[in-house]
């Protein structure tokens, strides 16, 4: 079962049933890696309006002159709604690139690198984006000033044109640029102008997060010479001027080559002042708040929501082919108690040792209980749950069990590349995947996973067989409001391909039908897993 929300809460807040949550702000940083130097670089972001095909300019970076590898300081800050497909277009003067906001966020480490398409036959290089959710920091560094002493001489006249570049560290060990000072011409002992920077730009609320500062000697052609570097943190900087905020500028290459090397100069914090800023948060009613009738997860005392209807419709039929009626059920896309850790594959009953629920009624009970316990959260990542079920299926490939994963989601998929890879890998295993889309979202991307027309592929490999069936629930809803009829229509279509998919696996492995067995606990079984931005798995009996 997918945990969805039209506007995610921020990382620091955990409230399962909060009906109003702040819109999630996502900061996008752009960099380019070019095949040849262009006299200037700038990236312009265009966004496509919902329900239209019109592109409008959202913002642009600063202009950087004469460099192969521009790292832009100016960011793009966007509101993220994970159930919407937010189309983006990035242009520079050599090419352009199309993607969705969800693709950037769902990429490993929040880092997406793509080739720029532009002039035919000309290599335009690549463009790199890193995404990070902005915390609700209230502190802003209003004034910060640095000076340096005895920086390394760089030019013939014994002078340097130094400037500082500030980076914040990322979890994967990389760094994101967050500020660049002005260039001080012909000076080995420069004093840079004070500058203002939000604390979230330096550390995004983590005061002990590493801040790296590079010292460069400016060059007119853009190939700036590296003088050295030092590291600090916001917590250290906030102490103000002291012996703790005098930093040796170290050049690792020189340090490795010269035995008598001490440093390439020092940089000192001259002053810092901090100011509390008022915070005005844009609030939105979360569609996924289960206590509100507008939510697709709404727990009405009078009728089932779309998630429960889809789960019950498919589960009640497929459970007849299961011997023990135990269904492993998982959720994906939620913050879990007690600390709000985000998970894309958690047991609905919160028992990692035994995620089984007794019958479909047990799954429904665990689903409704989880809605009272977790905070629904995006993005919508499918690969973790598919891979989890695939690991179970890989343990039983003798034909005695076949696994069916039911995924119910109202979100646009955020990790399409990883999901395709997971489907291709799973296609060689005894399993099928049923995806039911609920709600009004655009599910065009899901059709890529349903390999009826074109077999799913990933990195040049094609799926061994078609194992995915996708349907939007809205196509099966009875206009008169008859839930029983809606559920019957849905179950008929989504389960129609399972027998052929089961047989295709058995034939591909040369597994012959067994004589009919009496129904015992040792009978071969089919396994069904359901995922509704929560998921369930179950074994089913592959009777001949």
Image (spheres, grey):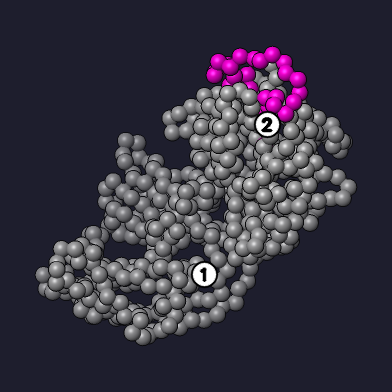
Q: Quadrant of residue 316?
A: top right
Residue 376: numbered disc: none
| Residue 31, picture quadrant | bottom left
C-alpha separation, residue under disc 1 versus residue under disc 2:
45 Å
**For residue 396, above or below residue 361:** above
Note whether 391 is above or below 125 in the view shown: above
Q: Is residue 272 above or below residue 45?
A: below
In the figure, residue 518 lies in which quadrant? top right
Q: Nearer the viewer, residue 357 or 188?
A: 357
Q: Earlier in the sequence, mark 1 or mark 2?
A: 1
Query: Which circle, 1 or 2, is nearer the viewer?
Result: 2
| Front position in the image: 298 or 178 | 298
- Per the image, the residue denoted by label 2 is 539
Q: Element type at marker 2?
A: strand
Return the x and y of residue 266 as percentages of the image width and height.
26, 77
**Residue 254 as seen in the image, left or right of residue 325:** left
| SS assignment at label 1 | loop
Q: Is residue 366 magenta?
A: no
Which stretch did the figure color magenta? 502-529
Q: Residue at x 23, y 67 (%)?
A: 251
Is residue 408 shown to the viewer in this render? no
* Residue topped by disc 1: 205
Check the picture and name the quadrant holding the N terminus: top right
Q: Is residue 430 left or right of residue 110?
A: right
Q: Nearer the viewer, residue 154 or 387?
A: 387
Residue at image point 34% right, 57% down: 70
> Where residue 382 sits: x, y (%)?
59, 42
Q: Residue at x 70, y 42 (%)?
A: 356
Residue 40, position as x, y percentages in the image: 32, 56
User: Residue 508 in magenta?
Assistant: yes
Quadrant in which the C terminus is drawn: top right
């Amino acid at each position: 079962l997918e945990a969805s929300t039209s506007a995610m809460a921020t990382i620091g807040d955990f409230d399962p049933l909060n009906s109003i949550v702040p819109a999630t702000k996502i900061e996008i940083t752009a960099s380019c890696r070019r095949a040849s130097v262009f006299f200037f670089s700038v990236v312009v972001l265009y966004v496509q309006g919902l329900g239209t095909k019109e592109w409008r300019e959202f913002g642009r970076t600063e202009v950087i002159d004469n460099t192969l590898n521009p790292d832009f300081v100016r960011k793009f800050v966007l509101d993220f709604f994970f159930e919407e497909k937010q189309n983006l277009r990035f242009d520079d003067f050599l090419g352009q690139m199309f993607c969705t906001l969800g693709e950037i966020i769902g990429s490993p480490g929040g880092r997406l690198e793509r080739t720029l398409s532009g002039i035919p036959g000309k290599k335009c290089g690549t463009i790199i984006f890193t995404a990070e959710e902005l915390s609700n920091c209230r502190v802003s560094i209003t004034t910060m000033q640095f000076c340096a002493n005895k920086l390394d001489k760089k030019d013939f006249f014994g002078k340097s044109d130094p400037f500082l570049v500030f980076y914040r560290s990322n979890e994967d060990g990389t760094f994101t640029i967050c500020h660049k000072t002005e260039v001080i011409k012909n000076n080995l002992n420069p004093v840079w102008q004070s500058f203002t920077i939000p604390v979230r730009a330096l550390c995004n609320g983590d005061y002990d997060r590493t801040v790296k500062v590079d010292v460069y000697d400016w060059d007119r052609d853009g190939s700036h010479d590296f003088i050295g570097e030092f590291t600090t943190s916001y917590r250290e900087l906030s102490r103000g001027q002291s012996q703790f905020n005098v930093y040796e500028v170290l050049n690792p290459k020189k340090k490795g080559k010269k035995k008598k090397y001490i440093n390439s100069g020092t940089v000192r914090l001259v002053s810092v002042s901090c100011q509390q800023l008022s915070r005005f948060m844009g609030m939105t009613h979360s569609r996924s708040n289960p206590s509100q009738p507008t939510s697709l997860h709404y727990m009405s005392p009078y009728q089932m929501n779309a998630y429960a209807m889809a789960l019950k419709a498919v589960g009640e039929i497929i459970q007849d082919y299961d011997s023990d009626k135990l269904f492993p059920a998982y959720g994906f896309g939620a913050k879990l108690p007690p600390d709000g850790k985000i998970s894309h594959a958690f047991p609905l009953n919160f028992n990692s040792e035994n995620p089984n629920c007794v019958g479909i009624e047990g799954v429904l009970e665990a689903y409704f209980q989880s809605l009272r316990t977790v905070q629904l959260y995006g993005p919508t990542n499918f690969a973790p749950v598919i891979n989890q079920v695939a690991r179970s299926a890989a343990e039983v490939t003798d034909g005695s069990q076949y696994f069916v994963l039911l995924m119910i989601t109202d979100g646009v998929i955020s990790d399409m590349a990883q999901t395709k890879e997971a489907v291709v890998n799973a296609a060689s295993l005894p399993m099928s995947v049923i995806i039911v889309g609920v709600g009004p979202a655009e599910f065009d991307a899901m059709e890529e996973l349903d390999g009826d027309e074109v077999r799913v592929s990933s990195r040049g490999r094609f799926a061994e067989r078609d194992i995915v069936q996708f349907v939007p629930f809205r196509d099966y809803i009875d206009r008169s409001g008859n839930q029983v009829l809606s559920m019957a229509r849905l179950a008929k279509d989504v389960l129609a391909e399972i027998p052929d998919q089961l047989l295709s696996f058995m034939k591909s492995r040369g597994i012959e039908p067994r004589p009919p067995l009496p129904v015992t606990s040792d009978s071969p079984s089919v396994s069904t897993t359901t995922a509704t931005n929560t998921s369930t798995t179950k074994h089913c009996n592959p009777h001949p």
